[in-house]
């Protein structure tokens, strides 16, 4: 059904359907991360809750890889009938400034609503000799090029956040990209990897005593881990990242369908079941309606271009406007 909803034949078959009849069949929601990770789990709960409002199943389709940006070309290619939607990570608005791509998130994707953001942190195994971030940086300086640090992929917020810290300290290290959270956290816990930077998919591992949280990238200390310092507290003024995300659809989807999707997912995101699942990962709702979310992603696009230019990682590195 998911494949059919994205094909040319599907467009011909359902072209006469009135927007008022939407939805009359299952909706596919692309989640550009591996199954079983924190984002996948929360989005599946959200999809099930939204399905109750819409009266049709919302089927999650995982498309991991490319730092969560495979949702971009998928939505660009999808029939604009509302039956294919996707989770929109911030990397979607970053990658066009890192490499040439065939899609433009501002042109090809219609924002539906913003849902939340995430807490990022630096973790090590509980058996690690690094008791704090300063220990890790001191060891890395004394052992150039030997520190191994994992992230959820090249160009992800986790990668850029760590690059901003270690690069600013003049530390050389080995970056190990992963497609998602689970494999990375297992590698850190087993000390195959010396450190990991991730969103709060690390929370269950920290709570179970398998990982030690050294610092978080939020503006304020986490209510869940109040003893853990922020990077800002440690002297890194620009190291505040929360990677807001939401849901989008192909750009040409009828406005009345966007409203139906918005209303269903807004109701779902404030359902106690979804809120309790987000709380497991130190997340809170950060709702923005369709117009406000569209405005926000335009602002994010400008900010991401400037960040990449500052780090020398953008295709237009050196330009700051």
Image: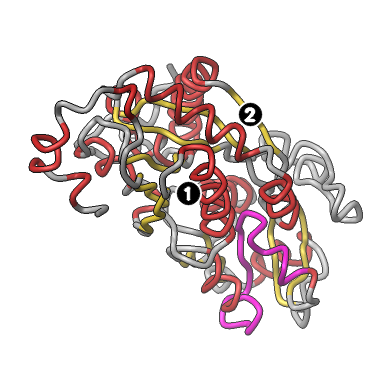
Q: Is residue 252 above or below residue 214?
A: above
Question: For this rendering, which residue is in front, 34 or 196?
Answer: 34
Question: For this rendering, which residue is in front, 65 or 312?
Answer: 65
**Which residue does the numbered mark 2 point to in the structure image?**
287
Q: Which residues are magenta?
A: 188-206
Mark identifier at residue 156: 1
Residue visible at 76% across and 60% down in the picture: 133
Residue 146, given in percent of the width and then of the height, sits at 55, 74
Residue 162, given in percent of the width and then of the height, sits at 59, 52
Q: Please identify the quarter of the rendering in which residue 164 is found.
A: top right
> In whole angstroms, how far apart are the C-alphas of marks 2 and 1?
22 Å
Q: Is residue 268 above or below residue 177?
A: above
Question: For this rendering, which residue is in front, 68 or 21?
Answer: 21
Q: Is residue 198 one of those drawn in magenta?
A: yes
Residue 120, given in percent of the width and then of the height, sits at 66, 50
Side of 25 relative to 203 (left or right) = left
Side of 128 relative to 160 (left or right) = right
């Amino acid at each position: 059904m998911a494949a059919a909803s994205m094909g040319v034949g599907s467009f011909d078959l359902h072209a006469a359907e009135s927007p008022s009849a939407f939805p009359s069949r299952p909706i596919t929601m692309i989640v550009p991360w591996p199954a079983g990770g924190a984002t996948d789990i929360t989005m599946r709960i959200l999809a099930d809750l939204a399905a109750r409002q819409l009266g049709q199943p919302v089927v999650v389709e995982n498309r991991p890889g490319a730092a969560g940006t495979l949702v971009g070309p998928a939505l660009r290619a999808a029939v604009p009938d509302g039956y294919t939607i996707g989770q929109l990570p911030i990397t979607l608005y970053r990658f066009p400034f890192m490499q040439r791509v065939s899609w433009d998130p501002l042109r090809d994707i219609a924002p539906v609503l913003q849902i939340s953001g995430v807490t990022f942190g630096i973790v090590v195994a509980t058996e690690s000799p690094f008791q704090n971030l300063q220990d890790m940086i001191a060891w890395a300086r004394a052992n150039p090029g030997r520190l191994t640090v994992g992230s959820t992929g090249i160009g992800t917020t986790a990668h850029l956040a760590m690059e901003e810290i270690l690069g600013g300290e003049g530390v050389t290290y080995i970056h190990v990209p992963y497609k998602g959270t689970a494999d990375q956290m297992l590698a850190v816990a087993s000390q195959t990897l010396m450190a990991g930077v991730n969103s709060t998919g690390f929370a269950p591992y920290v709570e179970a005593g398998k990982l030690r949280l050294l610092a978080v990238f939020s503006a304020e200390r986490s209510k869940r881990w109040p003893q853990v310092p922020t990077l800002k507290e440690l002297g890194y003024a620009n190291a505040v990242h929360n990677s807001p995300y939401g849901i989008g659809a192909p750009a040409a989807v009828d406005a009345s369908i966007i409203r139906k999707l918005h209303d269903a997912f807004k109701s779902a995101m404030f359902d106690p079941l979804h809120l309790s699942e987000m709380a497991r990962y130190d997340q809170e709702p950060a709702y923005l309606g369709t117009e406000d979310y569209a405005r926000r992603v335009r602002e994010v696009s400008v900010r991401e271009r400037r960040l990449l230019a500052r780090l020398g990682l953008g295709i237009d590195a050196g330009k700051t406007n």
